[in-house]
Image: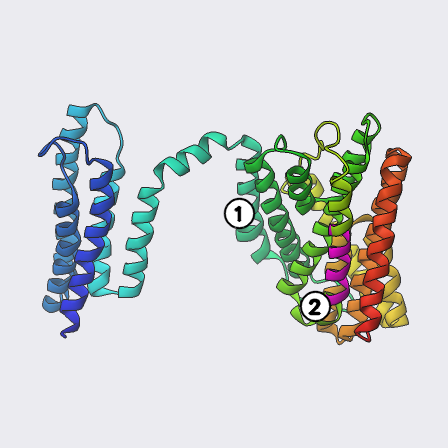
Amino acid sequence: MDPLISRLGLALAIGLLVGLERGWQERDAPDRSRTAGIRTFGISGLLGGVLAALANALGAVSVLVGGFIAFAAIFAWYKAREAAHDEDFSVTSVIAGLGVFALGALSVAGDYRAAAAGGAALAALLASRELLHGLLKRLTWVELRSALILAVMTAIVLPLLPNRTLDPWGGFNPWEVWFLTVLMASISFAGYVAVRILGTTRGLLVSSLAGAIVSSTAVTLALARNAVSASNAVPLAGAASLAAMVSVLRVCVVILIIEPSVFAPVGVPAIAAALAFAACGALMLSRGNGDGESGAVARNPFELGPLLLFALLFAFVATASAGLAAQFGGRGLLATSALAGTFDVDVSVLGALRLIRHSVPVETVGKAVLAALAANAIGRLLLAISAGPVSFWLPLAAATLVAATIGIGAMLLTGF
């Protein structure tokens, strides 16, 4: 088949796809009351392809440019008449018509795969009107600001940072520190979105699991405070145990994303400990429904202050880990990982994972990650003891002990 024929067929298909969506949206309108439907959009895509083919054959791009201007003027004029009649100020169909024409031209004169993808994306975007408008109504200013902060962090700040180490031990790379900070905030933002979509009023289990994606420490602290006034604190301790499970699994996901080689020594003991937390949590939750909500409303992870604090802490831990590993070997790395993990397991794990690129053995980094997980579990337990009653922290301590025992057993069985 002549390639031109297949490309013109693609131009027509793009128009028909978009026209199908536009026609469905206006399917209840009387005949001949709308400027453009499935046939008009199909012809618009084909017209763009034909004019692009003529421009190629004649060697005159002005043919395509002039055709596009004429099409835009005629299409917009008819849509303006329709809008005046219907008292409608939407310009979506006009932009969609221009997009179909342009994609039809691209399918003939440019990359036909990009044109096909663009056509599918355009139709999907047009069909998502209710979904997008609903999300926009639920969007808060804080969340909009978070999206802008993320855009600035990735598109402006990140390219300006030097992508090289600035310390003698090879630990502090500004570009890597900022990139991993953005990555961790993005992962946490997924948890924040889950809380916003599911809501914290759907029960102890949902709010604790979703909140733990952002911060299991914050969830544990909130549960401990609620346990003070609860008649039965055991289910709250169960929710805290499930939050600990999520924290361990979250670290596993981070390892798989950043440095999959470390998952081999860490995966079995970490998952074994997570399953132990899950079993203990389910058992304790079955003891009752608890009183009140968990109160673990997730903080937006793109708040600028905490984000900068995370980056500074990460830079310090990364530099200290590299320096101590160079000076004392694996013992220095284990010490810094355990110390940092007590306060923030993400900082500790990221600092350890980066040392793989500096010839630190995978086994040593794996032990540092496990030390960070253990230290973080102890840190959560200490917070629970300081903020909650005995009826809350004692079951959580038992679950932590069970998880640690099973994790250590799995580590010994794997010969790690």
Q: Which mark is nearer the camera, 1 or 2?
A: 2
Can you give x and y, in whole percent of width and height, for residue 23 in the image? 20, 41
Q: Which residues are magenta?
A: 268-278
Q: Position of residue 394 (x, y in %)?
A: 89, 41
Vertical order, 305 against 266 (above or below): above
Neighbour tally class for label 1: few under 14, some 14-19, many 20 plus, Cα within 10 Å: few
Residue 337 at what x, y percent from top left? Answer: 83, 59
Question: Mark 1 vs mark 2: which is more N-terminal?
Answer: 1
Residue 308 shown left or right of residue 159 in the figure: right
Residue at point 34%, 45% (across, down): 125
* Viewer can see residue 248: yes
From the viewer's perspective, is residue 295 above or below residue 13?
Answer: above
Amino acid type, residue under disc 2 in the picture: Phe
Q: Which residue is mark 1?
A: 151
Q: Does 402 appear above or below 144?
A: below
Residue with the mark numbered 2: 263
Indicate the amino acid at tag 1. Ala
Does the magenta segment cover residue 131? no
Depth order, front residue of 70/354:
354
